[in-house]
Amino acid sequence: MSLLTLPSLADPHVHLREPGSENKEDFFTGTCAALAGGYTALLDMPNNPQPTISQLALEEKRNLAATKIVCDVGFNFGALPDNLAEYAAIAPKVAGLKAYLGETHGPLVFGGLTEIMEVFAAWPPAPEYAGKPILIHAEGQMVAAVIGLAALYDRKIHICHLSKKSELNLVRAAKARGFKVTCEVAPHHLFLTYEDAAPGSLGPYGKMSPALQNSTDVDALWQGLVEGSIDMVATDHAPHTCAEKESDKPPFGVPGLETAFGLLYRAACQQRSGLTVARLLEVMAYAPRRVFGLPPNAGEFEIDPKEEYTFTNTGLFTKCAWTPFAGMKGRGRIRQVRLRGAVVFEDGQVLAAPGSGKILF
Ligand code: DOR
Ligand code: ZN
Ligand code: ZN
């Protein structure tokens, strides 16, 4: 068996759930899942039950994470129209500012035009942070609105989890005009359609925000990923327990850290839509680090490039212990992950000590 060594991956969009939802995930289990999936750097999202919208909440997260993480973790700060005064103090300590706009759920959502304009005017709080983007959770027309605001205010925006062809067309047009727009796509929007979320199929386990779309959208996303309009893959790792998913009101979100590489590597071996291994490394390792200003990659991982396997709900490191990709195939089994010269994962075992990961920023 000859192994292939690759630069370790970086995921700019995960929900590690701590503090407040440790029943779903915590900093240790989430970063173990990352290593098992070939990732050594993550950016965590602010939508905890007590959202990361104050300096105090950010400090609490950083302190909690510092003793538990087994890979490197940075944080995004939550935008609200009434926390603009916090931006100056937190800007050096975060990757970017996350704005949940429009029609999703939870206490971090806002949508009035006046409020959104205030956030665009206030971020970045100083020119030296101009490289740090506003990350946008938005769909449909709201994507057009934020692209317009990025142009008006000359701001850098990053559109999270594109799911529709129409949104991709907006991003293409914005890039053609030279606007400072980047975007990501999630594996579930590349490998699943709304039909997979039907009652007899994934049912609530296929429910996420944005929702799964049709095959025309999926084909467009693949084209965008391969041609370069889509800058990167982000898992939007959003674990929820099986009990929550099977409840009367299942929450939105699916885990993704342990399945993304296998899915994408298999697709590259099949040259799906023309995807190459070089492009895979650009969208899963290089682009996230470049766009979000992460330190140079200090990790690598070894795979068996020939081994195909089937994803199952057993043996996962994520606390939620399920995957929407169970029964689907991956390729390139991850044998070993190294970070700063140390073997941190090998043959299904996490070897890194809690707290050995670094806080980014
Ligand atoms: O599917 C989603 N899950 N979309 C979101 O916007 C939030 C996320 C979560 O935190 O579970
Ligand atoms: Zn989102
Ligand atoms: Zn998310």
Image: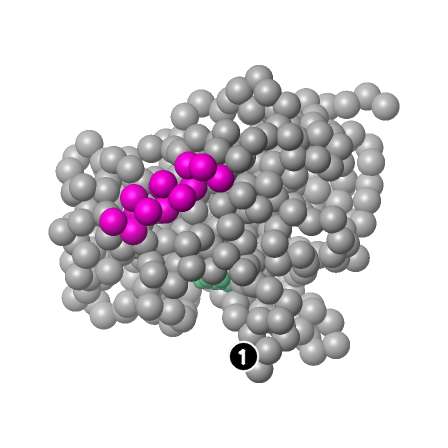
The quadrant where residue 146 appears: bottom left
Is residue 309 located in the magenta-colored stretch of the structure?
no
Q: In the displayed image of the protein, which residue is found farthest to the bottom?
A: 248
Is 360 left, or right, of 316 in this rendering? left
Identify which amino acid the numbered label 1 is placed on: Lys
Q: Residue furthest right?
A: 1
Between residues 209 and 361, which one lies in front from this camera angle? 361
At 18% from the left and 41% from the top, the residue drawn is: 89
Instruction: For residue 52, say whether it is visible.
Output: yes
Note whether residue 227 is visible.
no
227 above or below 211? above
Q: Is 95 rendered above or below residue 6?
A: below
Q: Which segment is the magenta one?
A: 56-68
* Vertical order, 63 against 116 (above or below): above
Q: Quadrant of the C terminus?
A: top left
Main SS, magenta region, reads helix
Residue position marked by numbered label 1 in the rendering? 249
Residue 225 locus on image (x, y percent): 55, 45
Residue 54: x %, y % from top left: 24, 52
